[in-house]
């Protein structure tokens, strides 16, 4: 019997890996751990968590992501300002009542959500 697989990397296809890795590493408080001309990695955000890799692809993003990250934050308004300062953009108005969240785009148009923690 084989061991259960572990998610080691989340890979993001992009046009400019260093630009995108810099945005995400600053947003998540991570460090860039490796790079060459076609890829950049950032360290896992938590112990045992997956690293995030950014890889050059020739195609541009044309449709909605099928997978995105939800980031839990203590203060949605403060983090919205930080996402925008890092080069992200607002994609939707704040939604939800018991759990407020908002959709954003990273610098290349990939969706992410900030979800305000209940506490």
Image (spheres, helix red, strand yellow):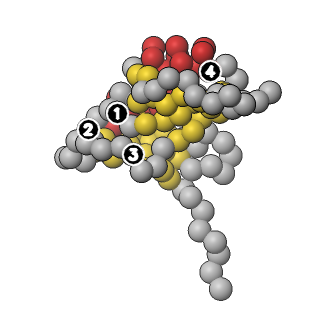
N-terminal of the pair, mark 2 or mark 3, is 2
Q: Mark 2 = which residue?
A: 15
Query: In the image, residue 47 lies at what x, y percent?
Result: 68, 46
Q: In this view, does 63 lie to the left or right of 77?
A: left
Which quadrant would the C terminus be assigned to in this image? Answer: top right
Question: Is label 1 in a helix, a strand or a loop?
Answer: loop
Q: Residue furthest bottom?
A: 1
Quadrant hosting residue 44? top right
Between residues 95 and 84, which one lies in front from this camera angle?
A: 95
How far apart marks 4 and 1 lie (CA) works out to 20 Å
Query: In the image, residue 3 lies at what x, y percent?
Result: 65, 75
Quadrant hosting residue 87? top left
Q: Which residue lies furthest to the right in this view?
A: 119
Q: Mark 4 = which residue?
A: 76
Q: Mark 3 = which residue?
A: 65
Q: Mark 1 = which residue?
A: 109
Identified at 62% across, 49% down, the residue is 49
């Amino acid at each position: 019997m084989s061991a259960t697989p572990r998610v080691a990397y989340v890979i993001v296809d992009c046009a400019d890996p260093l630009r995108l890795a810099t945005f995400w590493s600053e947003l998540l408080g991570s460090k860039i751990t490796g790079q060459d001309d076609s890829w950049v990695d950032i360290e896992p955000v938590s112990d045992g968590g997956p690293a995030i890799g950014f890889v050059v692809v020739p195609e541009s993003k044309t449709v909605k992501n099928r997978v995105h990250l939800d980031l839990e934050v203590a203060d949605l308004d403060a983090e919205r300002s930080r996402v925008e300062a890092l080069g992200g953009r607002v994609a939707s108005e704040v939604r939800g009542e018991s759990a407020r969240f908002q959709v954003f785009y990273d610098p290349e148009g990939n969706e992410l959500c900030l979800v305000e923690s209940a506490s």
